[in-house]
Image (spheres, grey):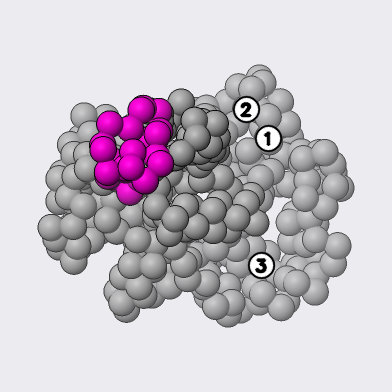
Amino acid sequence: MALGSKCSILKVTDSKKREQGYRWVVAFHAEDNRRRKFFKRKTDAEDFAESREREAVEHGSSELSASERAAMLDLRDRLASCGGTVRAAIEEFCAKRESAAKSVNVETLVADLIAAKEREGKSKRYLQDLRSRLGRFAQDFEGRTMADISTEEISEWLHELRVTPITEVNYRRIIVRAFNFAEKRGFVQSNAAIESEKVKVIPGQVGILEPAQIAALLDAADESVIPSLAIGAFAGLRRAEIERLDWSEIDLDSNLIEVTAAKSKSARRRLVEISPNLREWLLPHRKLAGKVDPPGARERAEEARERAEIHDWPSNALRHSYASYHLVEHKDAARLALELGHVNSVLIFANYREVVKPKDAARWWAIMPDDSDRKVIAI
């Protein structure tokens, strides 16, 4: 039985009440006060007591006032209309209050995150980028706890940065990472940043990398992701195709990469030529079989971009770069369409024609690894 719901039935001892004919009294709690109700017959007192106790069981406590019970019933109906319950709503509220109580301020969280990444052995450039982007976030939200920052505030903050769309996307990615870190440690109940508005990069001229950028990227990359990055840059395979690619499908004797129908976006098998410089990048990592892309490849590639200080990363940067430099170098749209897996050359002329200069294309295809220490040969 709910706390405070028990009623007591007693004989009346008050002489004045007895003169009025009352012989029984029911003592009970209502609105946090001890109340009494008098009855002339014991059966009436028992019926009242039973009714009060039953009401306490149904509504959780006999201490609720009429207005409180009405509010509770209204809340229950509103929650039921959207598939919720009073218990679930209370538990969620309490969980948020508990998270807020043990949350930390933004400055502490940023310091803890950077310290954790230092222990993981992250690169100096990677840590510098974290300090720069998160430092600005911590400065603007100084004194605030992580649990106190809303999704709407994060969206507004990103918008007020007044940076390029791609840079804003990079800022958002770092903030999401910080809230993930906070969530794992119980400082927030959920990741408020993950639902923040993500700026759209307005379609326009195809975004590509410069030869110096891809050279810096390969130089900064972990050995395990060099093959996949090189294949993207110098063979133009889609990211999803690289993730499915097996070393058994890379024929360095024939200088061909087979993209099977099952692994191709267009569901058509194609052969992609291995350029001389791509061959040099692949040879040191050659295997008979096994996945080309290692576990965690996306994160490792992202870290390489940070180390290479490539903060504005165009959509499909490697594939678009390959197509643009290939078209200028070979001047053969039909051949390029086959290499990319396109049905015809319409998209080639629409997106890649005259995007780069011949001298830049020559530099792109001259990027080679240095056998001595795997540094990129100067271009």
Mark 2–mark 3 Cα distance, whole angstroms, equals: 29 Å
- Where's residue 189, x and y in %? 37, 43
Mark 1: which amino acid?
A: Leu
Q: Which of 222 and 201 is in front in this view?
A: 201
Question: What is the magenta range?
Answer: 9-36
Say which residue label 1 marks: 245
In the picture, the quarter occupied by the C terminus is bottom left
Say which residue label 3 marks: 327
Q: How crowded is mark 3: few (under 14 residues within 10 Å), some or many (20 or more)?
A: many
Residue 56 vs residue 146: left or right?
right
Mark 2: which amino acid?
A: Lys
Mark 1–mark 2 Cα distance, whole angstroms, equals: 6 Å
Q: Residue at x 39, y 67 (%)?
A: 152
Q: Circle 3 — which element?
A: helix
Q: Which of marks 1 and 3 is nearer the N terminus?
A: 1
Q: Residue at x 66, y 67 (%)?
A: 327
Residue 196 sits above or below residue 229 on the image: below
Q: How crowded is mark 1: few (under 14 residues within 10 Å), some or many (20 or more)?
A: many
Residue 127 vs residue 19: left or right?
left
In this view of the protein, can residue 213 be seen by the observer?
Answer: no
Q: Nearer the observer, disc 2 or disc 3?
A: 2
Q: Do the residues labelled 1 and 3 touch (CB within 8 Å)?
A: no
